[in-house]
Structures are given as C-alpha cells and as structure tokens.
Image: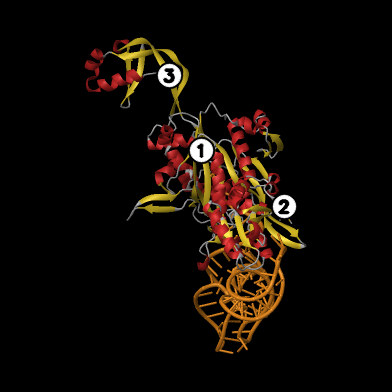
Amino acid sequence: MSDIMEMLVRRGFLWQSFEIYGGMAGFIDYAPLGNNLRRKIENVWRKYFVINERAAEIDTPTVGIEDVFIASGHATSFTDVAIECEDCGRVYRADHYVKEKLGIEVDETVEAVKEVMEVYDLKCECGGKFKEPAPMNLMFSTKIGPGKGKNGYLRPETAQGIFVDFKRLASYFREKLPFGVAQIGRAYRNEISPRQGVVRLREFNQAELEYFVHPAEKTHPEFPTVAGDKVKLVDKFDNEHQITLSEAVEKGIIANQILGYFIGKTRRFLLEIGIKDDKLRFRQHKDDERAHYATDCWDAEVETSYGWIEVVGIADRTDYDLRRHSAYSGEELTIFVPYTQPVKVKRKKLVPKMNKIGPAFKEKAKKVAEAISEFDGEYSDEIEIVVDGERIKLNREFFDVEEVEEEVAGEKIVPHVIEPSFGLDRISYAVLEHAFDRDVVDGEERRVLRLKRSVSPIEVAVLPLLSREPFESKAQEIVSLLRSEGIITEYDDSGSIGRRYRRFDEVGTPFCITVDHQTFEDETVTIRDRDTTRQVRVKIGDLPAILKELLESEREITEFGEVFR
RNA sequence: GCGCGGGUAGUCUAGCGGUAGGACAACGCCCUUCCGAGGCGUUAGCCCGGGUUCGAAUCCCGGCCCGCGCACCA
C-alpha cells in the first residue's frame, strides 16, 4: 500500500467496505474525515455550478424503472456482447474482437455475433473455441415490488433523473432557456474488475449539471470571465495546446463557446479545491471513444500515482436524451421559443368540401376530411392522401384552396444539453494526493496534508500546552465557543504539544489554537499555521471572527495578530 | 474474467511444521512553559473455509481481498 493510502486508512479518510467479512472490490466507506472532505468539495461545487448559474439542484431515485434505460439507450448500449474462450477463459467484447480479427463491424446483438462467429469460424487467440456469446450488462438489475415485480436498475448516472423530469423543470424555470439542473448523488456500474483504489468503483458519487440551451445558441453570457484563462488542452489528434479558452474556441479546437465556458469553470473549481494546475489537462475524446449520446466531449484529467485519470467529463449531449424520452414516453419535451417579432406567414390551406366528401366516402368521410386539412405536400389539382392504409386520389371537386395569413409567434424546440459530469470519488482522492507532502521542521521530517482551508475536514484544533489543569479546562471552554460558532473543532490533550501538532498536520487541519501560560494573564491564545508552523497571539474573544475570516480566504495569520516565536 | 506476486495487532515487520516476537501508533499514570522527548503499565494479530499431519501462521486445495500485466471501463 502506498504511503498516502496507508495514511488515509489509518487516520480515517477511506476504509474498505465490508472489511470484517473479507471486503468486496469496488466499494469504499467514507470514514469520518473523508466524508467531511467530500461534503466540503460538494459545497464548493454547488457554489460554482448551482448558486452561480441559472440552475437548481434536485434529487431523484437511485433505482430507475426499465423504461427509462431503454429510452436512454443504457439497456442496449450498456449491454455489450461478450465472448468467452472455453480453453483459456479469456473474455472479449465481441464487437472489438471481431473488428480486430476480421476487420468487420458487427451489431451488438447476440444473434449478429453468433452468425459472424459461425460464418468465419472465429477462434480465440489461444486457438480455443468460444462459448455461446452472452450479454454483459454493466447495470445492476433488481426487481421492484413483490413477486415477479417490475424490472428495475440502479442508475448508471444521475443525469437520467433530470431528463425524465424535464417537463416539470421547464415549467419551474418559466419555459425560458437557458437553465441548468444539477444532481449530486450515487450511481452504480457493475464493473468487471474494479481496481486502483477509488479510481473504478461499483458504487460512486457523481455531481452532474445538465445545462439546457437553445441549439442555435451554444454560448454563455459569463464566458468572458474565463476567456483569458490559459488551459492545457489535448485535442482528439493528440496535439497539445497551451492556449487561452477564447483562442481555443475561435480556432474551433473546442466545438462551441459554452463547452469552453464549462471547461474554464471546471478548471477554476478544481484549482480552488486544491488540484495542482500543472497536473491538470483537458483531453478531447477521439471519434471512436465517445458515448452513445455525445457529439463533442472533453475530459478533465488529473495526474496521480495511477497516471492521468479522468475526473470530469464535459459533453455536448445534444438533444439525444430529450428526443429519446419524448419518443418512448409519448410526451412532448420541448420549449416554446418566441420570435422577437411574430412572423406573418402566408400559406395555402386546403379546405375539405364536406357536402361532396360525405356522400362519396360515407363513414370514412371524417377521416378523409382530416387528411385533407393536414395535407402539407405540394398540391395541384389532384392530391393523394392515405386513409387507413388506403391511397385515395382526390380532385378539386373535394376541396377548396384558401390563402391564409397566419401569425407565428415562435417555435417549439428541443433544447440541447451541455453536461459537466464530475466523479467526486476520484476528485476527492486526487485532492488528497496533491495535498500530501513532507517537509522538515526542526530537523525532523513531517508529513503534512496541505489541503485548502475550504475543504479541510477538521478546521481547528484546540490544544492545552500541558496536559493538566487549568490548561485543559480552558482549552475545552474554547472548543465549546468555536463549536457554537459552527467551526469544526477538535480537542486533543494526549502526548506532548509537538506530537499533537504533527497529528493535526497529517490530516490537514489548517489551524491549531494553543492555551499557554500567558492565556491566564491576558486571555490570549496562539494560532498556529499548518504550512509555516508560525504562530500569532490573539484575544480569545476575537477568535471566532478571525478564524472564520481565515477559513474563508487564504490570508496569512500574520495579518491578524502579533507574531509569537 | 485470465495470468503472476502478495495477505501476521491500527500500521510496518520477524518467524516459514513444534509455546507468535519486535517497532511505531493508540489508551492510562507520571514527567513536561511550544513542534512525533522520557519512564512505567495496558489493549491488540497469523484473511476465510477445507485438507495433509501427533501437531499448520508455515505444506496442499478452494474462496475473498490487495498489487501488477492482459482484457474490460456507456
């Protein structure tokens, strides 16, 4: 186990789930400090992607009904067809293997794969025969209700809950684009072989924003705020660019402005929580790498001891999801977009002559009339309509042509969706790894977690200089004071003062308050800064205000009091 | 899922057929006026299940977990 993982487990950031039963790969427990850290990261995320956007956050079930995933495409495209060798036991994705060995594309159905295997007598690389092809679904399935029940799946992404609620959401946002809908929650994928700590989990935490825009307006009013930011980009041809976002959008490296905006915003968010800029890049998906729903897609990748890992996906999902859910549910999922000026449209309209149609078509007359009214093809003196599968030719005897002028106030459009999707587990881990450091204090090596103050799981530790009265009682008093102000505060009187400082350094606590002899003379204590180990002396009464200011900023403690040793 | 290598107190590690040992951590007491000091004491372990054997942490088989390679990763 790496040093950092050893520390994270020992000090209570991450634990193996179900450990006393031998554990289960792909599941982790957020221990007290890890849980605090992730929650704090979520709060910074909210600040960036909900509060500071025209956006709202919702929470939908983690179990989804089958219809949702048939519509979303996960029930089919998430189900790869797998082939397994009888001899060596290796398992391949059938479409990949067929393409590699035979150079042909095969549909991802069991039947299609079976046919190809028979026609070409496909063998394993080891020479062995393959077993029957079988589906391999990455979604956890379950039954809803007693008895046979209804098929359900644990959601493989939080996004679908948002698309499904689109009608209600559009009305919540007063039918006006653009708007964003966020969801933070668990998602599930039954991975074949989860590995590498928190990098591939079977149950994981996502923070997703679905930002609905007009398809012709893939811009964002706030783009200028990030336009000048220099970003490291790796495009789909593996070309590296160190370039400003405005330039990248102008040159067409990034498909549209709004993708550029969210790349910039994502970068600023990651930097704020402590990801190192030189270990961050944005990589464009190659054409064969994109998910079934996306057109352009950029991943934020962060360098860790596992190499470059994907932590955020920023995709233009177009109108794929809304169109699919509309088709499968029968609901119209559109937004009415008014024109700035209503447009007057002249058009020719066919008006059925009922007095002729009635006698000629009897009981079919009504349907014929409807078909004439709805007719929108090229018309001449004779038109052809279809009623109940029967083609009927009609001449001018049966309809009149009227020229009408209609006012069209706007159009119904299916919004496109820009989706920044964050993997909170990987992000939390990367933040910890980037913060993990060693330095030397008084000739002694020290392990210190240089977490940003905004994400530190313990904000302040209060320590008696000596573990005896009256130091202990005074320290406890200060703990109560700070806790009542909402500051996450710990108390520790075990071992010596040096040992306690090191303990809190190791878990990234930015400030230690020490009660010393002088405290009893003038009601002052010292604040020690984790990174510099310097101390300043301040009045106990001023502590809450000073600490809150320090925790919300990255200001120096020396601004707040006289330096002490 | 396949192959290789691992799994001994909270952590690291010794033992590799014959009574499981240490270091650090944690906890208690003493000592200590600022950066993992010291003393005394305490807690705590052979991944799980089967087999071989008089006797298994040790050898064999299966499972689980961890690491690496292959495959997989909408």
Q: Which mark is residue A57?
A: none
* Front residue of this view, candidates A387 and A128: A387
Residue A389 vs A46, above or below: the answer is above
Instruction: Write the residue at 36% across / 16% down.
Output: A383
**Lower sequence index among marks 3 and 2:** 3
**Lower sequence index among marks 1 and 3:** 1
Instruction: Write the residue at 66% across / 30% down.
Output: A246
Res A384 quadrant in image: top left
Q: Chain for mark 2?
A: A
Q: CA distance from mark 1 to mark 2?
A: 49 Å
Residue hosting label 1: A210
Res A369 quadrant in image: top left
- Amino acid on which disc 1 is placed: Glu
Q: Counting other residues with Cα less than 10 Å from the Cα at mark 3, is it few (<14), some (14-19), or many (20 or more)?
A: some
Q: Quadrant of the C terminus of chain A?
A: bottom right
Q: CA distance from mark 3 to mark 2?
A: 69 Å
Residue hosting label 3: A409
* Front residue of this view, candidates A328 and A181: A181
Residue hosting label 2: A563
Labels 3 and 2 within one chain: yes
- Amino acid on which disc 3 is placed: Ala
**Lower sequence index among marks 1 and 2:** 1
Left or right relative to A437: residue A494: left
Instruction: Specify whether residue A12 is in view.
Output: no
Instruction: Write the residue at 66% across / 58% down.
Output: A505
Q: Chain for mark 1?
A: A
Secondary structure beneath dot 2 equals: strand
Q: Percent position (x, y) of residue A285?
A: 61, 40
- Amino acid on which disc 2 is placed: Val
Q: CA distance from mark 1 to mark 3?
A: 28 Å
Secondary structure beneath dot 1 equals: strand
